[in-house]
Amino acid sequence: MLSNSSTKPISQEEFQIIDALAAQPDNTQLSNTQQYRSYRRRWYGLAVLMLLNFMASWDWLTFAPISSDAASFFGFQSESPINWLSTVILFTYPIGSLASAVVLNRRGVKASMLSAAIFLIVGNWIRVAGVRANDRKGSFGTLIFGQILIGLGQPFALNAPSFYSDMWFTSQFRVSANALASLSNPLGGAIGQLVSPAFVTKPEDIPDMVLWVSIIATIICIPTLIVPARPPLPPCPSSAAPKLPLMKSIKRLVTDQQFWIIFAVFSVLVGFFNSFSSLINQVMEPYGYTSDDAGIDGAVLIVAGLVFSAIMSPILDRTHYFLLALRTQVPIIAVCYICLIFTQTESRQLAGPYVVSGVLGAASFSLLPLALEFVQEQVFPVSPELTSSILWASGNVLGGIFIVIMDALKYSATVGSPPGNMRRSLIFQAVIASLTIPFPFFLKPRNKRVVLDMQSRHAEREVDSDTGTSEEQTLQIRTV
């Protein structure tokens, strides 16, 4: 594993990676005269991207913590149709993900963010029409259509952090930048888990709740109009390096074993996180827990993850111990899914669910930006928008599939102890998650972008020794 210390010598293996990059026909070798700068405006664009992801997730989980009230509002006998309000977004994601990869590659990150904003605004206001139709009795079909539009828009925001961090940030900040943008998505889900039950105390409150969410979404999307398209100068050599075209990137990924290992781990664990977040109310409700209990449990899951990720991301940026983190966190996540089988009890004790959810959230959330950045270190110079689009699309599709399977495994309202419990669903979740434990141990510790930047700094120091220029002057990156 590579260290971020500028005093650590570059190994022969690392030089071989650089030589291989430089020898590629796509001309990834960089000019020695290239200038690099980091711009303060990158934080504004990152903040807007965070808000878009925040809103997309809030929209996704709007109805999950109030599934029983939503079922009553639309006159359904069970909560299964309400599950489709979350599931349809997950299944729609791959379509939007393909489009977002093309937009990011050809038009850039601002075009992708504008696309996300448009889909979110239109989808939210169609949802308002859906819950207010038929004299506030609602039109479920219209509501589903609004959810589909939100699902199409979500990948334009969620697939962008890897592309944005590669374009605007150096290797010392990329994991943190990706974490801020990517993890604002589950933060939106946490807010949804808390706000929806607070707004909705009875089914008749749902139209007003959806209206307020739509107003907030519209306000959040407006700053997208003035996001900078790209930095005038790249922040570091790996940002300036030309990336492979989409078709060449696809061909490279198809034969890259390391990519498929990360793909398998990311897809399964993100899929289960999405499914558990959507079903958490239904998991706890049969044991006598309230919607507020489930909402707090969902919030603990997400807040603990955000706090731990805020601690881990800067550490990983400094040390680049990506592989060690993966090999530690994946088993922890699997053990948490096993523990979830036993935490819900009819005594309604809350310590068990909250503790396990907190640990699960901490391990899962810090895994997201880590995997998204580490996969790019593995497959560089493949276009980052392609890897993030594929990973997020697969995670969301599997999330939708897992919801359908776990809903089918749920006991009926008259069967089970207690009736309607999801114990079989949690066992299925634990078994599949446990199968991912060996995967990280087959990965190789190759950090191509980090090595490229280190090689550039090493070359600059050699030039300094010949010209007499101080190392501090040459290595300084201006912030403007």
Image (cartoon, helix red, strand yellow):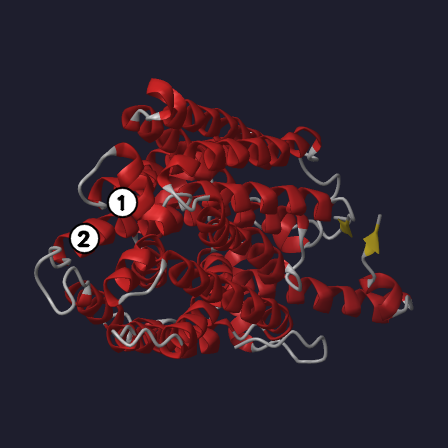
- The amino acid type of the residue labelled 2 equals Asp
- The amino acid type of the residue labelled 1 equals Asn
Q: Secondary structure at mark 2?
A: helix
Tell me the quarter of the picture where residue 110 sits. Answer: top right
Residue displayed at 31% across by 24% down: 139
Q: Position of residue 342 (x, y in %)?
A: 25, 77
Viewer-proximal residue among 17 and 69 = 69
Q: Position of residue 13 (x, y in %)?
A: 51, 74
Q: On the rendered structure, is 16 left or right of 407?
A: right
Q: Identify the residue position indicated by label 1 in the image.
A: 83
Tell me the quarter of the picture where residue 412 sits. Answer: bottom left
Residue displayed at 40% across by 33% down: 152
Q: Secondary structure at mark 1?
A: helix
Q: On the rendered structure, is 82 left or right of 382?
A: left
Q: Position of residue 258 (x, y in %)?
A: 36, 63
Residue displayed at 27% across by 45% down: 83
Viewer-proximal residue among 100 and 403 = 403
Q: Give the vertical position of 302 relative to 87 (above or below).
A: below
Viewer-proximal residue among 322 and 347 = 347
Badge count? 2
| Alpha-carbon span between mark 2 and mark 1 | 9 Å
Label placed on residue 407: 2
Residue at far left of view: 415
Q: On the rendered structure, is 180 left or right of 34?
A: left
Disc 2 to disc 1: CB gap under 8 Å: yes
Which of the marked residues, 2 or 1, is nearer the chain's N terminus? 1
